[in-house]
Amino acid sequence: MGDPVIRVAGANVRLGGREVLSGVDFELRGGELVGLIGPNGAGKTTLLRTVLGLLPLESGSIEVHGRSARRAQGSVGYVPQRHEFAWDFPITVAGAVATGRTHLRGVLRRQTADDRAAVAQALERVGMADLAGRPVGELSGGQRQRVLVARALALRPGTLLLDEPFTGIDVPTQELLSGLLEQLRDEGVAVLMTTHDLAAATALCSRLCLLNRTVVADGEPKALADTDIWLRTFGLDRAEQLLRSLGVGK
């Protein structure tokens, strides 16, 4: 693995007068698949959005591919949670995936041959090529998740951020996405995903970053067997349950 493609140093973020992230230090390298783990309200989605340049830092710094977060937007693919996309908008699957390249070509410019090729390749990778002309409003939950992943991949990103990609999807889509994330990692793409599915995270990820407003721990899943780490991240009620799912703990 080379130099970090994402560097977060001393990041502090406040939203609505409330401190959401405090002193976050984090790095992600090309060819890594890292799970960002933490309870609801821990700041996981906020961290992703701040890395994307969508939320401002109060203090600290973020570099993405050696540039500021805002200037690096064209090199980062983002898969939001499904409820954040307007599925009732009258657009086809291919049209939705094509919006992933708007940042590259501009809103008013027509698609180029390269845009169309990137969309076709992305749809092929998620197994949705045969549904390219279907309205997005007619898709199942698993199909919608595949569209969002394809939309991010159409950018041909060096870094991919995913927010809860395994929530509420069918088993075939879970298996497809797991295999696809492993392929992207092997291709050298840096992948960071938030998830509540600890079993999926430990099976897929070489590293887990435990976050609760700040980084509590960061390392290989087998190195995070200390109960105290999980207590500080999730609290007493959840720690033992999560450790059992990892197969570790006291």
Image: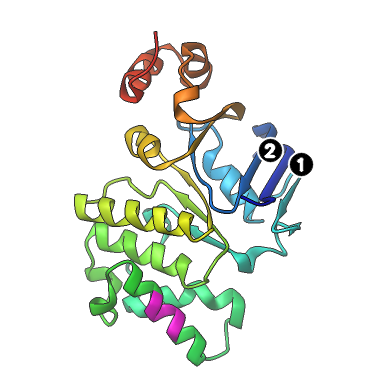
Would you say residue 203 is visible in this rendering?
yes
* Quarter holding residue 205: top left
Residue 125 position in % (x across, y down): 35, 69
* Residue at 47% from the left image edge and 46% from the top image edge: 193
Tell me the crowding category of disc 1: few under 14, some 14 to 19, or many 20 or more residues within 10 angstroms, Cα based: some
Q: Mark 1 highlights which residue?
A: 58
In the rendered view, would you say 111 is above or below 159?
below
Residue 29 position in % (x across, y down): 61, 49
Reading the chain from its start, which is encountered first: label 2 or label 1?
Answer: 2
* Residue at 45% from the left image edge and 59% from the top image edge: 184
At label 2, the amino acid type is: Arg
Tell me the crowding category of disc 2: few under 14, some 14 to 19, or many 20 or more residues within 10 angstroms, Cα based: some
What is the secondary structure assignment of the residue under circle 1?
loop
What is the secondary structure assignment of the residue under circle 2?
strand
**Residue lying furthest top:** 250
In the rendered view, would you say 14 is above or below 112?
above
Q: Which residues are magenta?
A: 117-121
Magenta stretch holds residue 119: yes
In the rendered view, would you say 133 is above or below 97?
below
Would you say residue 106 is visible in this rendering?
no
In the rendered view, would you say 150 is above or below 62?
below
- Relative to 73, is 87 on the left or the right? left
Q: Mark 2 highlights which residue?
A: 14
At label 1, the amino acid type is: Glu
> Which secondary structure is most common in the magenta stretch?
helix
C-beta proximity under 8 Å, tags 2 and 1? yes
Residue 121 position in % (x across, y down): 39, 77
- Relative to 74, is 154 on the left or the right? left
Magenta stretch holds residue 201: no
Q: Which quarter shows the C terminus?
A: top left
